[in-house]
């Protein structure tokens, strides 16, 4: 039996950390210079909650074994579906829902 190489999970976890932290690091100088009197704190809270929620979901997927497909989807793959649906070949397709998640949500 040959030893199995680790999957892309450590690399994806590191990429997720960089993706989540860089905007905050880059924004530090702007935070001190901002005029906070004109900021809608409720909207800021909602936007932060969405960001934290998506980061939590991504972290959970990595911790639970990643994406069943074995890799994240590429934007070109989504664009191919959109191009097909916008073409004349898909004229008879109406009211359909397409889940593009790499197999993380079981669907029938």
Image: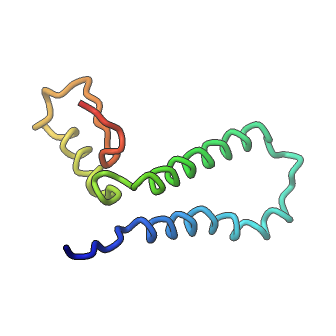
Question: Percent x, y for residue 63?
Answer: 48, 55
Q: Residue at x 23, y 30 (%)?
A: 108
Q: Is residue 14 left or right of residue 79?
A: right
Residue placed furthest toward the right: 37
Residue 70 vs 2, above or below: the answer is above
Name the side, left or right, on which 35 lies relative to 105: right
Q: Residue at x 50, y 50 (%)?
A: 60
Residue at the limit of the structure toward the top, as seen here: 95
Residue 15 location (% of width, % of height): 50, 68
The location of residue 69, given as percent across then percent down, is 27, 53
Residue 53 occupies which quadrant of the picture? top right
Q: What residue is shown at x 31% (from left), y 51% (from top)? A: 68
Q: Residue at x 34, y 68 (%)?
A: 7
Please state if 27 lies on the left or on the right of 87 as rendered.
right
Q: Quadrant of residue 103?
A: top left
Residue 88 position in % (x across, y down)? 12, 37
Of 2 and 102, nearer the camera is: 2
Tell me if residue 86 comes above or below residue 36 in the rendering. above
The front one of 89 and 65 is 65
């Amino acid at each position: 039996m040959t030893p199995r190489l680790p999957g892309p999970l450590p690399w994806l976890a590191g990429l997720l950390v960089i993706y989540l932290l860089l905007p905050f690091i880059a924004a530090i100088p702007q935070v001190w210079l901002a005029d906070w009197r004109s900021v809608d704190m409720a909207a800021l809270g909602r936007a932060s909650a969405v960001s934290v929620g998506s980061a939590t979901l991504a972290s959970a997927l990595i911790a639970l074994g990643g994406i069943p497909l074995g890799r994240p989807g590429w934007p070109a793959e989504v664009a191919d579906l959109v191009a097909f649906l916008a073409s004349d070949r898909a004229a008879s397709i109406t009211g359909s829902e397409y889940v593009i998640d790499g197999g993380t949500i079981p669907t029938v």
